[in-house]
């Protein structure tokens, strides 16, 4: 199941991938700040959305 982690404030996608990543790893990658709006991600829990992608199989 793919995971999408977004900034709560501006909605910038901080992480998108098939593997689940713990939030602290994502925070570490961006030094605790949103690269888009500069919001401190450490002070607030970041919004983690887990999205399911339905795959259609064509026969
Ligand atoms: Zn942001």
Image (tube, rainbow, N blue to C red):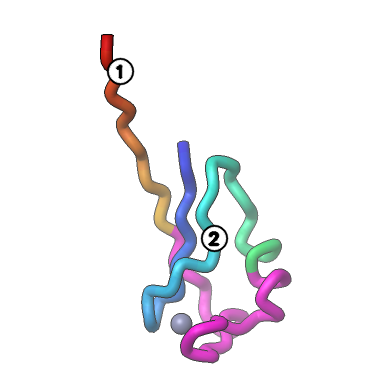
Residue drawn 35% across and 38% down?
Answer: 53
Q: Quadrant location of residue 7?
A: bottom left
Q: Is residue 6 left or right of residue 19?
A: left
Q: Position of residue 4 (x, y in %)?
A: 46, 55
Residue drawn 28% across and 24% down?
Answer: 56
Q: Position of residue 19 (x, y in %)?
A: 59, 42
Q: Residue 44 colored magenta?
A: yes
Q: Is residue 28 left or right of residue 51?
A: right
C-beta proximity under 8 Å, tags 2 and 1: no
Helix, strand or loop at disc 2?
A: strand
Q: Position of residue 48 (x, y in %)?
A: 46, 60
* Most frequent secondary structure within the magenta stretch: loop
Residue drawn 62% across and 81% down?
Answer: 42
Disc number at residue 15? 2
Does the Cβ of the disc 1 residue fall within 8 Å of ligand 1? no
Q: Residue 37 colored magenta?
A: yes
Please report the bounds of the magenta region as a residue range. Answer: 27-48
22 up-or-down from 31: above or below? above
37 up-or-down from 3: above or below? below
Disc number at residue 57? 1
Q: Residues within 10 Å of mark 1 (few under 14, many from 20)?
A: few
Q: Nearer the viewer, residue 32 or 56?
A: 56
Q: Residues within 10 Å of mark 2 (few under 14, many from 20)?
A: some
Q: Is residue 41 left or right of residue 11?
A: right
Disc number at residue 7? none
Helix, strand or loop at disc 1?
A: loop
Q: What quarter of the picture does the C terminus occupy?
A: top left
Q: Nearer the viewer, mark 2 or mark 1?
A: 1
CA–CA distance in space, label 2 to label 1:
26 Å
């Amino acid at each position: 199941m793919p995971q999408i982690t977004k900034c709560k404030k501006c909605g910038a996608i901080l992480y998108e991938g098939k593997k689940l990543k713990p939030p602290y790893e994502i925070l570490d990658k961006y030094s605790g700040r949103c690269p888009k709006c500069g919001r401190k991600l450490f002070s607030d829990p970041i919004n983690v959305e887990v999205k399911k992608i339905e795959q259609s199989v064509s026969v």
